[in-house]
Image (spheres, rainbow, N blue to C red):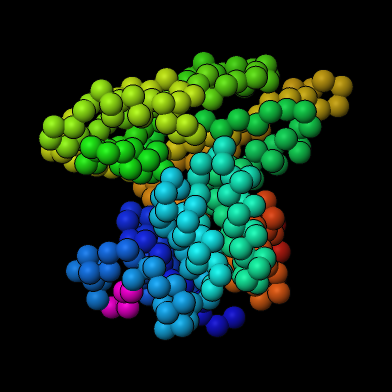
Amino acid sequence: MSSIRVVVAGYGNVGRGVIAAIRNNPDMVLAGIVSRSPERVKKEISDVPVLPLADVEKWVAELRPDVAVLCGGSKNDLPEQTAMINKFVNTVDSFDNHSCIPQYFAKVDASAQESGFVSVISTGWDPGVFSMERVLANSFLPGCRAYGFYGLGEAGGLSMGHSDALRTIEGVLDARQYTHAVPEAIEKVRAGDNPQFTPGDMHTRECFVVAAPGADKEKITSEIINMPGYFAPYRTTVNFVTMEELKAKYSGFPHDGLVVAAGTTGDGNAAGIEYRCKWSSNPEATANILVAHARAAVRLAAEGRKGAFTILDIPPAYFSTLSKAELLEKWM
């Protein structure tokens, strides 16, 4: 396969991570960057074209990408951008609002089926890799519930999607959101209780918010804790900090997580399955997984496939740079 030409759509933390990942993959080349703020991006990037995101047909014709990796936020960006861009090129995105994925899939699939392109949606480490692990655990231990827990350390884990959602609120200059797993909930699962949790039983959310001068902090707090799909189901703490405090104390991007399931085999023999990941940089973790899925999207398209796909629909070999012979010899 010749080099896969990738366009990065959006130049935030995930976009920067995708660019770094592309340069670590020998079968890929960065064809260009598209952004709503191209002049801002050009101040940092000078070795590839940077074009306005909105004129999709024009930048596809000029940059000739095989696939576009969409790095916008799930709350406002991706619901509009994905169906707009997949009219002209294959796409991969990390839409992460779990409760809205069925509706999002249907919208993206309709657009991609009509245009004939491939759109891989909702991939990263969760949704994405953890989605696959939950399905595998439930398949190997029928009847068990497979649970995802995030933010296992004392500091918790920084959620990019939820932080982005905070920044869409009027009066918020910047913000970070940290997720904390409830340890007692993890132990209930490991014990084989198969509990019927609500989202708020498994995690709490902690927000650090920089408010604009004169902003109504009570209104901001109310909007955060009542935001459907993000904070409403959880016990959420909102802390207002200065920009200096945010940058000094909450500038890193660590995250980690665990998929855990417990059940029985045969005549009631206890069995447990766990999958753990730990990332020093959450955006770079998502970026690396997006780039592997970009390779898979191009391979699906080469087979004449079209429409929306998730990680559950794609053979794992499609993500790898290795040949089938190498996979059989070295990785089986």
47 over 148 or under it: above or below: below
Quarter of the image for the C terminus: give it. Answer: bottom right
| The N terminus: image quadrant | bottom right
Q: In this view, does 230 lie to the left or right of 311?
A: left
Name the residue rendered at 55%, 67% in the picture: 86
Q: Where 198 falls versus 146 (above or below)?
A: above
Task: Decide if residue 67 is in sight here.
Answer: yes
Rendering coords of residue 179 (x, y %): 41, 30
Percent across and percent down for residue 42 are 23, 71
Q: Going by the image, does 32 lie left or right of 42? A: right
Residue 128 in the magenta stretch? The answer is no
Number of numbered labels in the structure image: 0
Q: Main secondary structure of the magenta part?
A: loop
Q: Where is residue 272, by image quadrant?
A: top right
Q: Give residue 218's quadrant in the image.
A: top left
Magenta span: 47-51
Asked if residue 318 can be seen in this view, the reply is no
22 lies above or below 143:
below
- Residue drawn at (71%, 64%), measured in percent from left and top? 328
Is 43 above or below relative to 244?
below
Could you tell me which residue is drawn at 53 percent across and 34 percent down?
Answer: 258
Task: Identify the image quadrant of residue 166.
Answer: top left
Q: Position of residue 244 (x, y in %)?
A: 13, 38
Q: Which of 266 and 2 is in front in this view?
A: 2
**How far from the left and from the top, in percent, is residue 90?**
56, 69
- Camera-nearest residue between 10 and 30: 10
